[in-house]
Amino acid sequence: MKKSYISLAVLASSMMLAASCGTTAGITSSNSSSSSNTTSSAIEAGASLLGNLLSGVLGGSTLSESSIVGTWNYTGADCVFESENLLAKAGGAVAASKVKSEVNDNLAKVGIKKGACSFTFNKDNTYTANLGGRTIQGNYTLDAKNKKIKMTYLGGLASMTPHVAMNNGKLSLLIESSKMLTLIKGVSALSKSTTASTISTVLSQYNGMYIGMQLSK
């Protein structure tokens, strides 16, 4: 898409140059450069926007049960919003980046960090999650069409159904902030940490936000 826009800008600039002469050639060249820069900025802004929206993350994802089988290691937190309107109300991409950083820092306090957190999805639809030294086991059911994965735990007494996306070789489990908070509270209780209270304060400031875990093999 980016190449297409740039090619059109170059073509337009060439046509304008052929129709002009003298000093106007310099003006046309300057305008062409400005137009190209504006186009590039618009494309980058659009990519940033999609990267912070749930639909943008899920839209480019292709899933199958075979593609998620294996061990996935935690690389960092993710943060996306349900709609462009909610993202704007929250403060835009800057707010999303800030929340992501704060969640990353607080998850690390309960052991959910690089090298200490992983998910293993087996072919028999069972999974094992290592969350900062604490192990959670259960069954999973992938809904590839709707980009969701149901994961049971506590012997099947509890479950969560995060959105799931796979982009550029990375797997993201995205959970509505209130439900993510429930999971974090459970982990925090096990580790006798007050981190859940801190994250609760952060998450309660935003509506329509999904917090996730980015994983890679």
Image (cartoon, rainbow, N blue to C red):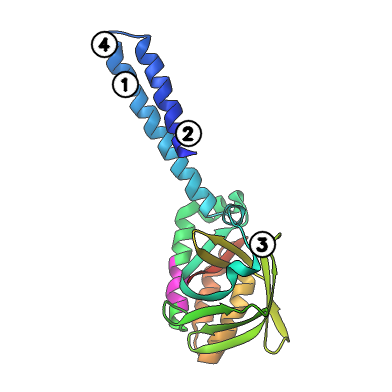
Q: Position of residue 173 (x, y in %)?
A: 58, 68
Instruction: Tell me if residue 176 can be seen.
Output: no
The residue under label 2 is which amino acid type?
Ser
Which contiguous range is marked in magenta?
101-107
Q: Position of residue 55 (x, y in %)?
A: 62, 53
Q: In which quarter of the image is residue 13?
A: top left
Q: Which of marks 1 and 4 is nearer the N terminus?
A: 4
Q: How crowded is mark 3: few (under 14 residues within 10 Å), some or many (20 or more)?
A: some
Q: Which of marks 3 and 1 is nearer the N terminus?
A: 1
Q: Name the mark nearer the viewer: 4 or 3.
A: 3
- Classify mark 2: helix, strand or loop: helix
For the residues marked 3 and 1, what is the alpha-carbon distance in whole angstroms?
47 Å
Res 4 label: 2
Q: Mark 1 points at which residue?
A: 29
| Disc 3 + disc 1, Cβ < 8 Å | no
Q: Earlier in the sequence, mark 4 or mark 3?
A: 4
Q: In this view, does 143 lie to the left or right of 211?
A: right
For the residues marked 4 and 3, what is the alpha-carbon distance in whole angstroms?
57 Å
Q: Name the residue under label 3.
A: 147
Most foreground residue, 193 or 31:
31
Q: Mark 4 points at which residue?
A: 23
For the residues marked 3 and 2, what is the alpha-carbon distance in whole angstroms?
30 Å
Q: Position of residue 119 (x, y in %)?
A: 55, 78
- 135 in the magenta segment: no
- Classify mark 4: helix, strand or loop: loop
| Disc 1 + disc 2, Cβ < 8 Å | no
In the image, what residue occupies the spot 52% across and 63% down? 79
Q: In this view, does 181 lie to the left or right of 118?
A: right
The residue under label 3 is which amino acid type?
Lys
Q: How crowded is mark 1: few (under 14 residues within 10 Å), some or many (20 or more)?
A: some
